[in-house]
Image: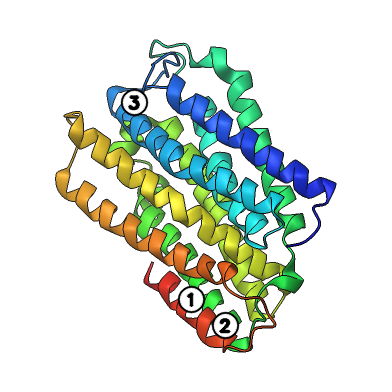
């Protein structure tokens, strides 16, 4: 345990505020109270229910745990903070930009300042978590572990680019996109594409390249990318499950099952990468490279 700097206290307080903000958003949204009426179609409302459930049951507890660990001076606190912070920063713009303001009734614009604050808070938490991660206390990396983690980063980028977006990009360039998600709400769909292809993929590629050159910052970046993957696939699976449960016409039970399995695998891989943070420090006499390799192999499976 180390002395707590003012910036670490601010990080902990920011995490608590983020947890409270995510809780309020989930409670006020369609999951529970319904005070925030998003200008979304029925399908997107059902997806929002799944998203809010993951925020409430996943991101909020992780944010609280990260805050407590940060206040205790634990190494894992700032690193763990990247999980809820990247999740919130990715989701908040979708609440603001995604709705169909001209075509669907609702009142979510009245909560613009709230969602803006949630977005800014998430970005600030990411910055503080990055700067307060003590790389000198992380397990000593090896050339092999950096190489394995770089392949994880390249795999994440390839999965998003080739598996998720390439077919749609081909349709889009041909001028006649027929993806059901695009037809349902082009603005929301393209916003997600902008976030995936403009932020997540470049972040994963940059981290992967940095790992190839054994840059210390790239190891923190890898935690951020994998931390994002810890919750976002679960949110996508929860969206599909909520559609099935609520009898949405666009629901597909088979797709929901596949996404649920993928979410478990991705989250387990992220947990494997994060687990060594809770073990003995760099001075321990066990074989660190084997521990890191096991974590990396778990992430590769994801």
For label 3, the SS is helix
Percent of width and height locating residue 273:
51, 69
Contact (Cβ within 8 Å) of mark 2 with mark 3: no
Write the residue at 58% across / 88% down. Answer: 286
Question: Which of the marked residues, 2 or 3, is nearer the chain's N terminus?
Answer: 3
On the image, numbered disc 2 is attached to which residue? Answer: 145
Contact (Cβ within 8 Å) of mark 1 with mark 2: yes
Question: Which of the marked residues, 1 or 2, is nearer the chain's N terminus?
Answer: 2
Q: Quadrant of residue 116 in the image?
A: top right
**In the rendered image, the vertical position of residue 279 relative to residue 122, given as above or below:** below
**In the rendered image, the vertical position of residue 191 relative to residue 287, given as above or below:** above
For label 1, the SS is helix
User: In which quadrant is the C terminus drawn?
Assistant: bottom left
Disc 1 to disc 2, C-alpha distance: 7 Å
Percent of width and height locating residue 68:
63, 48
Q: Of residues 241 and 76, which is closer to you in this image?
A: 76
Disc 2 to disc 3, C-alpha distance: 42 Å
Write the residue at 67% across / 81% down. Answer: 140
In the rendered structure, the answer to whether residue 73 lies left or right of residue 261 reads: right
Image mark for residue 296: 1
Specify how the rendered protein is coloured.
rainbow
Q: How many badges with numbers are in the image? A: 3
Disc 1 to disc 3, C-alpha distance: 36 Å
Indicate which label's residue lies in the foreground, 2 or 3.
2
Q: Of residues 171 and 225, which is closer to you in this image?
A: 225
Q: Can see residue 167? A: yes
Neighbourhood count class around disc 1 (C-alpha, 10 Å): few under 14, some 14–19, many 20 upward: many
For label 2, the SS is helix
**In the rendered image, the vertical position of residue 301 relative to residue 33, given as above or below:** below
Percent of width and height locating residue 231:
44, 50
Image mark for residue 45: 3
Percent of width and height locating residue 9:
76, 44
């Amino acid at each position: 345990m180390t002395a707590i700097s003012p910036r670490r206290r601010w990080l902990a307080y920011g995490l608590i505020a983020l947890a409270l903000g995510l809780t309020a958003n989930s409670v006020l949204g369609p999951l529970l109270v319904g005070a925030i009426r998003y200008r979304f179609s029925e399908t997107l409302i059902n997806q929002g229910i799944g998203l809010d459930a993951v925020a409430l049951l996943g991101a909020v507890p992780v944010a609280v745990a990260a805050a407590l660990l940060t206040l205790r001076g634990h190494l894992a606190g700032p690193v763990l903070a990247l999980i809820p912070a990247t999740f919130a920063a990715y989701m908040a713009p979708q609440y603001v930009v995604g709705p169909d303001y001209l075509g669907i009734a609702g009142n979510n614009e009245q909560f613009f300042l709230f969602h803006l604050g949630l977005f800014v808070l998430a970005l600030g938490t990411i910055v503080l978590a990055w700067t307060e991660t003590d790389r000198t206390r992380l397990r000593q990396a090896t050339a092999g572990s950096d190489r394995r983690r770089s392949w994880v980063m390249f795999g994440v980028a390839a999965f998003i680019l080739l598996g998720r977006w390439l077919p749609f990009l081909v349709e889009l360039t041909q001028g006649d996109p027929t993806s059901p998600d695009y037809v349902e709400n082009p603005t929301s769909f393209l916003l997600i594409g902008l976030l995936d292809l403009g932020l997540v993929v470049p972040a994963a590629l940059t981290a992967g390249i940095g790992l190839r050159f054994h840059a210390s910052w790239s190891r923190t970046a890898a935690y951020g990318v994998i931390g994002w993957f810890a919750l976002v696939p679960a949110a996508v699976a929860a969206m599909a499950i909520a559609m099935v449960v609520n009898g949405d016409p666009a629901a597909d039970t088979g797709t929901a099952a596949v996404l649920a399995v993928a979410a478990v695998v991705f989250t387990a891989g992220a947990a494997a990468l994060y687990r060594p943070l809770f073990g003995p420090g760099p001075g321990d006499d066990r074989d660190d490279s084997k521990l890191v390799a096991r974590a990396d192999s778990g992430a590769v499976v994801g």
